[in-house]
Amino acid sequence: MKDPYLFQHRNILSIEQLSKSDIFHILDTALSFKEISNRPVKKVPTLKGKTIINFFFEPSTRTRLSFEIAAKRMSADTFNIAASTSSAQKGETLIDTARNLEAMNPDIIIIRHGSSGAPGLLSRHIKAGIINAGDGTHEHPSQALLDMMTVRDHKKEIKGLTVAIIGDIAHSRVAHSNILGFTKMGADVRVAGPATFIPPHVDALGATVCASVKEAVTGADVVMALRIQKERQDDPLIPSLREYAQFYGINKSLLQHAKPDVLIMHPGPINRGVEMNPDVADGERSVILEQVTNGVAVRMALLYLVMGTQGVSS
Amino acid sequence: MKDPYLFQHRNILSIEQLSKSDIFHILDTALSFKEISNRPVKKVPTLKGKTIINFFFEPSTRTRLSFEIAAKRMSADTFNIAASTSSAQKGETLIDTARNLEAMNPDIIIIRHGSSGAPGLLSRHIKAGIINAGDGTHEHPSQALLDMMTVRDHKKEIKGLTVAIIGDIAHSRVAHSNILGFTKMGADVRVAGPATFIPPHVDALGATVCASVKEAVTGADVVMALRIQKERQDDPLIPSLREYAQFYGINKSLLQHAKPDVLIMHPGPINRGVEMNPDVADGERSVILEQVTNGVAVRMALLYLVMGTQGVSS
Amino acid sequence: MKDPYLFQHRNILSIEQLSKSDIFHILDTALSFKEISNRPVKKVPTLKGKTIINFFFEPSTRTRLSFEIAAKRMSADTFNIAASTSSAQKGETLIDTARNLEAMNPDIIIIRHGSSGAPGLLSRHIKAGIINAGDGTHEHPSQALLDMMTVRDHKKEIKGLTVAIIGDIAHSRVAHSNILGFTKMGADVRVAGPATFIPPHVDALGATVCASVKEAVTGADVVMALRIQKERQDDPLIPSLREYAQFYGINKSLLQHAKPDVLIMHPGPINRGVEMNPDVADGERSVILEQVTNGVAVRMALLYLVMGTQGVSS
């Protein structure tokens, strides 16, 4: 007799750590929470008296807000720490800062950090649940989960779909988490972008590298454009934004090669006219704002599930 | 038979949009909420489970705090976004940022923005109620409402009063909203200040331009000094602060020309010794701190009334 | 017949203002609140509907967060104001800013300020309770209280203990408050550090100046290392961090001269390898993280006790 499924992750550090069953369970839980945000009274007592800290070392509006909204809609007490006001300025190590937070008995720490692996490092030193809200070029698991939730809403099943991810694959934690997630769920993932944006190991992750955006998009069920991370590149890896838009931007004529019911996705914020044309971003196939809505539901699910493991050994 | 009055504004963008009945209704509602802030337990469940976002593109202590206190005293969940940490840095358009917020199902977004018309632009793209907390040199409706509430507390009726507004009329959204509000309620509004501070259209708004501060103040029931917006002027429009204080600063000898029961007002923060002398700001005719107290009550009323219209077409 | 003890401080400005009975009462109250932070639901309704403002003119992670956690675990509504976004930028005086806050009916204002005496100044102008969260080089009373609580947890009685405080005594409000507190409770306080760090008046406070760290540590029950305030010194008063570590850093060999059950303390954030070696900071005698945990309990006690005096004349 098979054991019943039990969610056992005290920390959500990556899509890599999650099994297919875990992802199904998270998405199902998120779906059950989604309607809370449409109620006149958008609040359930589930996490009352829990202490949840948003610890952001990089600026963020939507991810920080999405987690904070998710937490407050479940009645948790939330606390925001931004890097610029934190002890990081005073020369304290990340682990010392985390241990100090830990000593105040938080239940969950949500962390965004410029260094890949920072959330994992924390999770090895403290008992509070850690949720990775984006670490360097490594992973952004809640983003991939909300992307999968959005695709599943429209396509019923992720298995068997063709997902094209276009842009800066090499520097994108969103791309990394999505490649891992969609391939794990049985989709065929293709990537395309300027050569300097395609990392050498990407086929080992299960993605197919396409020679052109057109090739990647042809017959695709999902087209996801990545943001040009203008603020993260020290020296420009692309000749110009205009040239990027011309060769890699998603536009209507390009999408004629995709399936008629293709979903258009973008993790935001969009550089309109660069990685995506406005008529595509705002078009009828775009599910970009649904991604944001599902983000709150996915984060409610993560907070709920992580909290449920407290007391369970990771 | 006349229809009963119904407050129908989903958005509070300006005093211009409000009728006399609307203003009476807001002020009456505010008055009924005022005592909540004097209770030992300063909290009512009215807006429990509502999501209210403070979205401030300009620094602000008192206005942001006043809205946040108003919201929390009505049990709403509040969220703060400051421009410096927002996606504005990442090149996203204001409308995209707003649509993203909207996708997280907020009930009300309170916005302060350096550009006149930004709150109105938002209101045309999203369903959440928008409250203008100050936009460029356009309007600051909650400030004018708290000013009118303060005057009404002392004078019973605004109709028939003489209100003198002194200072930088041209660059002041506070002046603009107050001229519209007080004239709408039947007061006689006079303005005075350096010629560079008097906009050409001001008499079209219903205000009388006076040649001197003394002329404006003579016989006035209310004297409101505006703040010199040192941080907003690129090139100085006044020769020096000292000269400004001498010719346009409100002092005791000047006030001998006003009515004996004149009310002294200032939207804050005060540049003491510039637009107003300390003995006037702290004197017995000053109602400056009452303005701040009434600000919380007015904002509670606005949140409550805007929320009541949700589901009603604007 | 002796009057029963009554806590009567509307403001917590300093350790200096507190009697031995006050300190005992605060520490007992804190101990009774400590277990709340270990409950699954870390929340009691004690301060529901109270308005508590964190007003921080200096960057702080742990102190601000500790007060905010303390307040929310008692169900208060909390509000954060940081100096960089406050009206301070707009040239308003501190007293005007405070009066404006006061006009919004807060119950308690927690203030950190770079100028010694700023919280005291506020307390003379406004009715809300003021808690000093660190002012210049003057005092940091909640820190000294949490330090005394931590020592008392381990040693039962503070009276008769020998406490060695090492480092920058002259610029440390933590040192100042701790010297006052521990001597008041009957401990023998010794200080040591570079000559430039020992203020002339320190023996008048009741501390003994030692010629070397070794002398201070010999036979000590408690060794407290202070943080080198790198960010607060304009011109360096010490030749180099390396030399400081060699002569004044706390290391294992030095601690062989202390009592075997010595407690190692640090107010944080630690400059590891400068004022304290990692093997000491993380060693079995270190109670540094217990200090942080007790900080939340002490601040809950302060908020509770200050609130209890409202209506009582200070």
Image: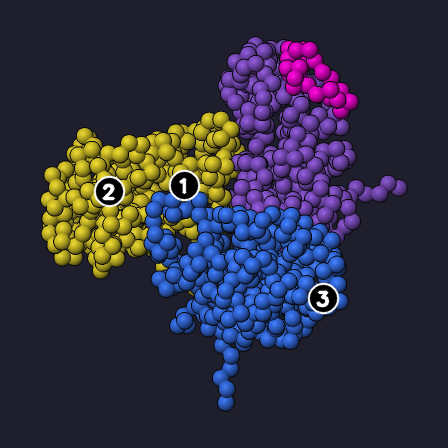
Chain colours: A blue, B purple, C yellow
Q: Quadrant location of the C terminus of chain C? A: top left
**Same chain shared by disc 1 and disc 2:** yes
The x, y position of residue B153, in whole percent, is 64, 29
Q: Which residue is drawn at 28% across and 53% down?
A: C288
Q: Tell me which amino acid carries mark 1.
A: Pro
The x, y position of residue B300, in whole percent, is 62, 42
In the image, taking residue A244 as reference, residue A126 lies left or right, namely: left
Q: Which residue is drawn at 67% across and 23% down?
A: B170
- As for residue B187 lying within the magenta part, the answer is no
What segment is highlighted magenta in the picture? B192-216
* Quarter holding residue A158: bottom right
Q: Tell me which amino acid carries mark 2.
A: Leu
- How far apart are the two marked residues, 2 and 3, measured between alpha carbons? 62 Å
Between A235 and C102, the one lying in front of the other is: A235
Q: Is residue C167 above or below residue C260?
A: above
Residue count near mark 3 (Cα–Cα under 10 Å), binned few <14, some 14–19, many ≥20: many
Residue at mark 1: chain = C
Disc nearest the viewer among 1 and 2: 2
Disc nearest the viewer among 1 and 3: 3
The disc label shown at residue C59, or none: 1
Q: Quadrant location of the N terminus of chain C? A: top left
Q: Do the residues labelled 2 and 3 touch (CB within 8 Å)?
A: no
The disc label shown at residue A258, or none: 3
Between A273 and C217, the one lying in front of the other is: A273
- How far apart are the two marked residues, 1 and 2, measured between alpha carbons? 23 Å
Residue count near mark 2 (Cα–Cα under 10 Å), binned few <14, some 14–19, many ≥20: some
The disc label shown at residue C241, or none: 2
